[in-house]
Image (cartoon, grey):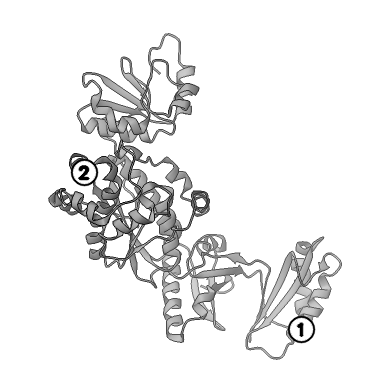
Amino acid sequence: MTDVAATPIIVRLAPEIHLKSPSTRRHFTRVLRRNLKRGLTGIPHELRTQQGRLVLYTPKPEAAQSVLRKAFGVSTFSPVEVVLKEVSVERLCEVVGAHFTEAVRGRRYAVRCKRHGRKDLSATEVERRVGAVLDGPGSVDLDNPEVVVRIDLDREQAWIYSRREQGGGGLPLGVQGRAMVLISGGFDSAVAAWYIMRRGTAVDFVFCNLGGSVHEEMVLAVCRRLVSDWGAGIRPRMFSVDFSGVVEDLRAKVPGDAWQIVLKRLMYRAAEPIARKRGAEALVTGEALSQVSSQTLSNLETIDAVAGLPVLRPLIGFDKAEIMNRARAIGTFELCEKVPEFCAIADQRPMVTSERAQIERLEAALSDACLEHAVAEARMHDLGAVPATTERTGSLLVDRIPDRAEIIDCQPPDLYRDWHVPGAVNHPADELAASFERLPRDRSYVLYCFRGTQSAVLAERMRAAGYDARAFAGNVAKLRRQWEGRPTADAGV
């Protein structure tokens, strides 16, 4: 690659890296270079170290910048707008005047100059004389400028630029080992994974599946988004553990008020052997103190007791609004919003305080073989591979509601009252998850819900139990448009 064809981008390492010892700093920088090269796959580029700085040369600067914005270990970066080979104060005045007059017009500005190994020019004189060229179109403001024109002088050239973009911050992925994230697909666990990645930790994921293959696909989509956007340099795995048998055993042998706590302990027990095989040194969860009943100090102490690895909780002091705002910022909000939560595992009020000995006695009644079998049969997904096309077998999803099907509206009651398909019976998703086996088995069912996700998961669970059940492929808005626009004589949608 020649400098003529490529735009240089100055890449600044996170400040923490500069505070490390020389050997640690070199190691962190090597890891960052490796991650950037992997993240820039398919984008022509060359990484160089010049005057102690990392410089990326590429003929596709916009594509490269999209990688840098989400590269952990990168503090800021600046695309260089002008590279000047023949450097003098007069030439700098001419070039800056030509390129930046319109940028500062009607705005406050400052000129900053730094020297890197060059002593024949005075940085102060360059700032004063070049700044005077722009005075008039803009107004000088050294304390609070709207535009900063920066001039970096090295031994051979001058780099001139005005943009300073934010990178991913934190530390390069991989410098702090590996951790196993217990992922649910909800807002919290994805944000927790992002925070632990930002501290330089490579991650894998364990998903304890309570909702079948549709639920698994939704969680897999969240993991893929997180890794594709923020995981430059690593290739994580997601392990899906079928917890249907484990939950069935739990329901049969443990009192309902302890289900949530025992279930969390079982999830930790499932994640730990997988974590150890992957070389992970810690488990990561999205728990926040007192957000739900299982996340009180008392219950967290009881749950932690089962873990042989450290349990890291990056969100322990966050409230829900902060977590959701971060999910929006990192790009997982829309996917996580669609993932159903199975809040109705217990029909009793869960305990908010617990004693470890009591929970251990209850857990002793459960079958270790059931959990061990679930872990042994875990499905592994390579999050760095191109996802295969998923086929829904048995027509689980339908585009039109067929004749003579019994229609189940899975929305909350207030949304059901707002609008529902005429004749549809309201069974909110959480209630249906716990009670669908009371429904007659000699009928055909079509389910729908507000977003079209919980109904798909529930239909799959009903089919697994022997029901003729399907789900409408879409949300309520789509179904309503179809229903209200159908011909009068058409009994279906």
Would you name the residue on which mark 1 appears? Answer: 124
Identify the residue at horizontal 76%, vertical 71% (top origin): 143
Q: Position of residue 341 (x, y in %)?
A: 37, 41
Using a 10 Å C-alpha cutoff, classify the residue at mark 1 as few (fewer than 14 neighbours), some (14 to 19) or many (20 or more): few
Identify the residue at horizontal 26%, vertical 53% (top origin): 265
Q: Which tag is nearer the camera, tag 1 or tag 2?
A: 2
Secondary structure under badge 1? helix
Q: Residue furthest bottom?
A: 119
> Which of the pair 110/455 is nearer the observer?
455
Amino acid marked by disc 1: Thr
Amino acid marked by disc 2: Val
* Mark 1 or 2, nearer chain start: 1
Q: Is residue 480 visible?
A: yes
Q: Is residue 380 visible?
A: no
Q: Residue furthest right?
A: 136
Q: Residue furthest top?
A: 489
Identify the residue at horizontal 45%, vertical 12% (top origin): 487
**What numbered label is drawn on residue 254?**
2
